[in-house]
Amino acid sequence: MINKGQKRFLECERLIIFIGLMGVGGFLGAYTYSIRGGVFCNAQTANFVLLAMAIGKWDLSGAAYLLIPISAYFLGAVLSEALPIHVKKFGLVRWDTLLVGIEVLVTFMLGLLPETAPYQITQVAVNFICSMQYNTFRQAEGTPMSTTFCTNHLRQVGINFVKWLRKGKSDSLGRSVKHLCMLGTFVLFGIISTVLCRLFLGKAIWGATIILLIVFLDLLHADLTCERDLLSEKPLGH
């Protein structure tokens, strides 16, 4: 739990947690594109474009294939919306913590797959966990953010920069800097992922596992100690 002025934020809302998860987003995006089929699995805009193109070409088998990652993303959103209330009843850890733990296991298991395994296994799994992460982690210290793609971060940099120029508000400049940090982190870990993929192929995904494990241990420590009595409190944005 941290306090900024009169506002109180949970550990799962800390900017450093979002930066770590944004790094994972950049890592996984580069990973799936580099060595798992040349696709980006963090978001679904490209898949919907490809779906429209496939239908336009009357490529029904191609259109049906694209429904697989889209459905996985949909299922991830549904489960991440439905499960927290049930996790809360146990009073052991927060859903946010459990989700990152699931991501640790999924990415570790994906690293164990042989290089001959169908790319679709990795694609669907990454679609699924990215969807859940996107729907779960929504605001960093009161600032709406995503941890799996960059479009809104770039938009927010521009919006808040103009607000700062017009009104000179330091909080607008601060928000621009936060979003720039997220963009920079995404790119940095995309670079790291690309290099590791060349060296270690499929096992490179364990780089994401390490980041997720660090985030998981931090969240778990908060759940079991300083935020033990706050497990039922919802993060902002939910």
Image (tube, grey):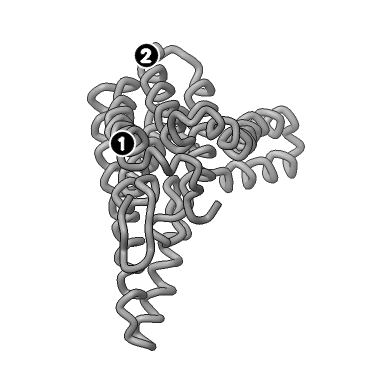
Q: Nearer the viewer, residue 166 or 237?
A: 237
Residue 73 seen in this snapshot: yes
Give above or below for 104 relative to 171.
above
Identity of the residue drawn at 46% across and 57% down: 151
Q: What secondary structure is marked by label 1?
A: loop
In the image, residue 220 lies at what x, y percent? 34, 33
- Three-letter amino acid code at the position of disc 1: Thr
Give above or below for 83 relative to 107.
below
Tag in front: 2 or 1? 1
In the image, residue 213 lies at what x, y percent? 30, 29
Seen as rendered, the residue at the extreme bottom is 166
Which circle's residue, 2 or 1, is located before the other in the chain?
2
Q: Residues within 10 Å of mark 1 (few under 14, many from 20)?
A: few
Residue 76 seen in this snapshot: no
Q: Nearer the viewer, residue 50 or 221?
A: 221
- Relative side of 118 to 75, left or right: left
Q: Are marks 2 and 1 in contact (CB under 8 Å)?
A: no
In the image, residue 13 lies at what x, y percent? 39, 50
Identity of the residue drawn at 36% across and 42% down: 227
Q: Which residue is mark 1?
A: 225
Identity of the residue drawn at 45% across and 40% down: 231
Give the CA separation, mark 2 to mark 1.
Answer: 33 Å
Q: Which mark is residue 112?
A: 2
Identity of the residue drawn at 53% across and 23% down: 120
Q: What secondary structure is marked by label 2?
A: loop
Location of residue 208 (image quadrant): top left
